[in-house]
Image (cartoon, rainbow, N blue to C red):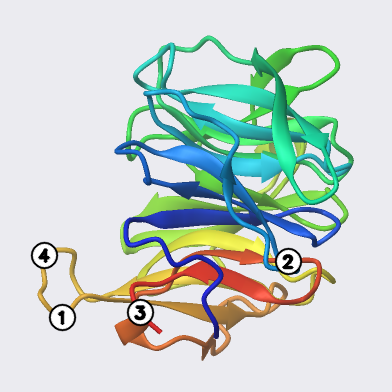
């Protein structure tokens, strides 16, 4: 692995643009979290897309690369969805029009554009009790997708399914759900993972593999570890492949369309 950012404070939650030229991420360079963007080649510098004094985080690109959805606490301390238009120049991106999409006094997080750009999946609810919701871009309406808990949704490449992280009696596990509430009500969802606490699932570009962030050990243990591992979506419980060292503390994985894996780490 090689570093993309080198700021001494936190740079987290990377999201690669659809064309693979830019990376958006969350940085605490000005005492709070803002959305930043940086070109992946050519030696360009990172520039902020948001500069509000409240926290902005969890960016996700629209499929056409013209917008970014993110969570902001600027009008609601719990966080709401905001949509930012992007203006492209030769070697930089500047912020355009900003719109608030949701007005919800519950905690919201983890927005993800669907592959066709028509919907945004996100999580809402008290910490540990979140459900996955869908925002319809055309109708400007929201609807619940899950009733059994879930957060950190990630769309399959064809948009028919989502990966989510949900609480169980044995830690947070990864589940595969359908993208319509009616289909989820008719099916009995089964976990894809069975050990550890698993977060931030994401698909490979061709949908053949899954990538998850896993914590091992008890939450209050001094030897608690975190690493990334690969799974097969059609083989629940099959052996996984650990791809990062526990010493890195790799988190927030994102699988780019360039087939590279982007993540945040304490050290390399």
Instruction: Please report contact status of discs 1 and 4: CB closer than 8 Å, yes or no.
Output: no
Q: Quick one: label 3 or label 1, which is nearer the N terminus?
A: 1
Q: Where is residue 245 in the image (x, y as percent from the top left)?
A: 39, 88
Q: Residues within 10 Å of mark 2 (few under 14, many from 20)?
A: many
Q: What element carries label 3?
A: loop
Residue at 83% from the left image edge and 41% from the top image edge: 89
User: Closer to the camera: disc 1 or disc 2?
Assistant: 2
Residue to which mark 4 is pinned: 220
User: Closer to the camera: disc 3 or disc 4?
Assistant: 3
Residue to which mark 1 is pinned: 223
Q: What element carries label 2?
A: loop
Instruction: Please report contact status of discs 2 and 4: CB closer than 8 Å, yes or no.
Output: no
Distance, label 2 to label 3, CA atoms, is 21 Å
Q: Is mark 1 on a helix, strand or loop?
A: loop
Q: Quick one: label 3 or label 4, which is nearer the N terminus?
A: 4
Q: In the image, is residue 188 above or below residue 234?
A: above
Query: Front-most of 13 and 178?
Result: 13
Q: Quick one: label 1 or label 2, which is nearer the N terminus?
A: 1
Whether residue 190 is visible here, answered yes or no, is no
Query: Front-most of 215 and 244?
Result: 244
Q: Quick one: label 2 or label 3, which is nearer the N terminus?
A: 2
* Quadrant position of residue 107: top left
In the visual, does 14 lie left or right of 134? left
Whether residue 84 is visible here, answered yes or no, is yes
Residue to which mark 2 is pinned: 256
Q: Position of residue 157 (x, y in %)?
A: 83, 58
Distance, label 3 to label 4, CA atoms, is 22 Å
Q: Position of residue 31 (x, y in %)?
A: 29, 38
Residue to which mark 3 is pinned: 267
């Amino acid at each position: 692995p090689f570093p993309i950012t080198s700021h001494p404070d936190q740079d987290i939650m990377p999201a690669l643009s659809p064309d693979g030229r830019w990376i958006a991420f969350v940085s605490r360079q000005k005492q709070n979290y803002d959305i930043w963007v940086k070109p992946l080649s050519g030696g360009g510098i990172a520039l902020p897309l948001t500069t509000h004094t409240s926290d902005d985080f969890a960016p996700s690109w629209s499929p056409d690369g013209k917008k970014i959805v993110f969570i902001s606490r600027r009008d609601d301390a719990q966080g709401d969805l905001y949509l930012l238009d992007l203006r492209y120049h030769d070697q930089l991106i500047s912020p355009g029009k900003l719109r608030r999409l949701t007005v919800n006094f519950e905690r919201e997080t983890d927005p993800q554009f669907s592959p066709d750009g028509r919907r945004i999946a996100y999580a809402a609810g008290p910490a540990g009790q979140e459900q996955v919701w869908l925002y319809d871009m055309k109708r400007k309406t929201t609807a619940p997708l899950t009733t059994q808990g879930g957060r950190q949704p990630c769309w399959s490449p064809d948009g028919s399914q989502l990966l989510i992280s949900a609480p169980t009696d044995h830690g947070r596990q990864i589940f595969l759900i359908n993208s319509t509430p009616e289909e989820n009500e008719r099916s009995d969802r089964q976990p894809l993972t069975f050990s550890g606490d698993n977060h931030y699932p994401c698909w490979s570009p061709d949908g053949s593999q899954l990538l998850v962030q896993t914590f091992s050990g008890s939450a209050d243990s001094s030897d608690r570890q975190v690493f990334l591992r690969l799974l097969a979506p059609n083989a629940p419980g099959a052996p996984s492949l650990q791809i990062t060292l526990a010493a890195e503390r790799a988190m927030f994985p994102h699988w780019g369309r360039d087939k590279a894996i982007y993540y945040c780490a304490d050290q390399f």
